Image (cartoon, helix red, strand yellow):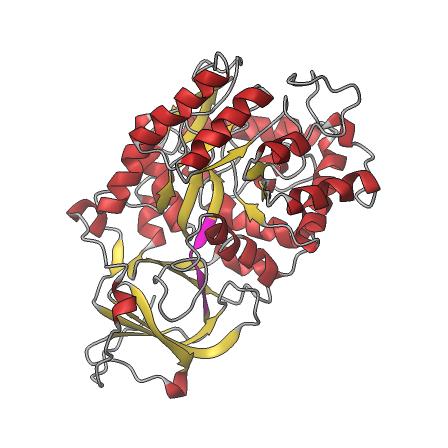
Amino acid sequence: MFTIPVRAVSALLLVPSLLRAQRPTLSTAVKQYVSVDTPAVALTHVRVIDGTGAAAKDDQTLIITGGNIVALGAARSIKVPDGAQVMDLTGKSVIPGLVMMHEHLYYPTGPGVYGADYVSFSRLYLAGGVTSMRTGGNVGGYADLNLAAAIKAGTQAGPWIDATAPYVNGPSPFTQMYALKDSADARRFVAFWADAGATSFKAYMNITRAELAAAVDEAHKRGLKITGHLCSVTYREAADIGIDDLEHGFFVATDFVNDKQPDVCPAQTGMPALVGFDVASPEFTSLVQYLIAHHVAVTSTQTVFESITPGTPATPGTDVLDPLLKTQYDQLYTRVQQNTASPFAKLFPLDQAMEVAFFRAGGLLLAGTDPTGGGGVIPGYSDQRQVELLVASGLTPLEAIKVCTLNGATYLARADRVGSIAVGKQADLVVIDGNPAATISDIRHVTLVFKQGVGYDPAKLIESVKGKVGLF
């Protein structure tokens, strides 16, 4: 619990540049999850981890006014505005709101079938510290776009959403996906969803090079970006075409598959070809440099692969699931742990090393969670876990936090507003009990989440959906 004394001191004047992000008007339904909602807030004696990779700064004071950060510095040097709500955060840390780049608003309810999960997922993301996110493809069509609009309007609780259109894909076994007919159809598909309000696109496993090229061209004409979970198209081919991002690290790259046929997804995808692969090989380092030269980002989604890797811990947060879905996950986890012959025991640490190599080479590494698979990825909880896994891969805590904040904002072209903590930026902040710069597992101890200067209570958000997640 916070102690919130109020001190009357001199007011802080706003400059015009700080007026860009006004505090939202929240509905009564959303206000029930809010614990801090005053025009001016002073976070005093807090440790600031600013998201840039710079060292943490202790005993800082941060002033929020009108949804923006208007002052930041050593506690002794910052004057608190008259009437501000003062929160003494001694022993706590503040990091930027997480900007996660491969999220979904659906949950696996059966083999190859996904159920919509808009309300509970959006609340869980926010409770976990995610204040901005990109959906990595959707199966709900207009529903994803409408939820993004509702959150922006203040009628639903959740992160700001870069709403990706339905998957841009060829024929596939997924009954919830449209199958492109040709490149002209791909262009029409992108134009249709862009006109409908989608702000991002994702190509999927069975798209052809011609279809991808048409989709990329149409998206770029409209100032929008397109990412891909690819298989029929290699990473190098996608870079040549102009794709902006590639999903799932290097797990799904088919560049190293022998006898890979053009525009055909190999029967065993790209993963078996990576067994025994050497991260230091010229073959891999050449691909990394090629992607960087073509300004292609790579999104790490280690949480979804950890859920199918033996020898890994159980997924955090499964107690919020509907009891039936919780049972399904528990059964899956048991089977995974018993499968000692699983190739993921070797593939998982290999992909971790590949992602770190890409990051160390200067690539723009992004992060997300991909709450699909067998149901072992829970929004919010897994976003925190993704940060932990990046540290386990070889990044420092400060680097991992940057990947999950400023890097995502940079990709979204929103780094002038979110992704780091600085005067003039939007007050999207996560208050943490502990010091994740020293002990990354402290990132799980979220006590308050600010979005545009409004402080949300994570416990209330989680409690509102507990036992129902996966259903709505």
As drawn, which residue projects farthest toward the left?
A: 28
Provide residue 30's location: percent of width, then percent of height: 22, 47
Q: Is residue 154 left or right of residue 130?
A: left
Visible residue check, residue 326: no
Q: Nearer the viewer, residue 470 or 320?
A: 470
Q: Is residue 391 left or right of residue 42?
A: right
Badge count: 0
Q: Residue at x 23, y 59 (%)?
A: 22
> Does 443 appear above or below 315?
below
> Does 235 appear above or below 57?
above
Examine the image and state in which quarter residue 402 appears: bottom right
Magenta residue check for 138: no
Q: Residue at x 45, y 48 (%)?
A: 412
Provide residue 425's location: percent of width, then percent of height: 37, 64
Provide residue 161's location: percent of width, then percent of height: 36, 42
Examine the image and state in which quarter residue 236 appears: top right
> Does 427 appear above or below 161?
below
> Does 76 appear above or below 158?
below
Q: Where's the N terminus, which quadrant?
A: bottom left
Q: Residue at x 42, y 35 (%)?
A: 221
Provide residue 242's location: percent of width, then percent of height: 57, 36
Examine the image and state in which quarter residue 238 appears: top right
As drawn, which residue projects farthest toward the bottom?
A: 76
Visible residue check, residue 186: yes
| Dominant SS type (magenta) | strand
Magenta residue check for 96: yes
Q: Which residues are magenta?
A: 93-99
Q: Nearer the viewer, residue 283 or 210?
A: 210
Q: Where's the C terminus, which quadrant?
A: top left
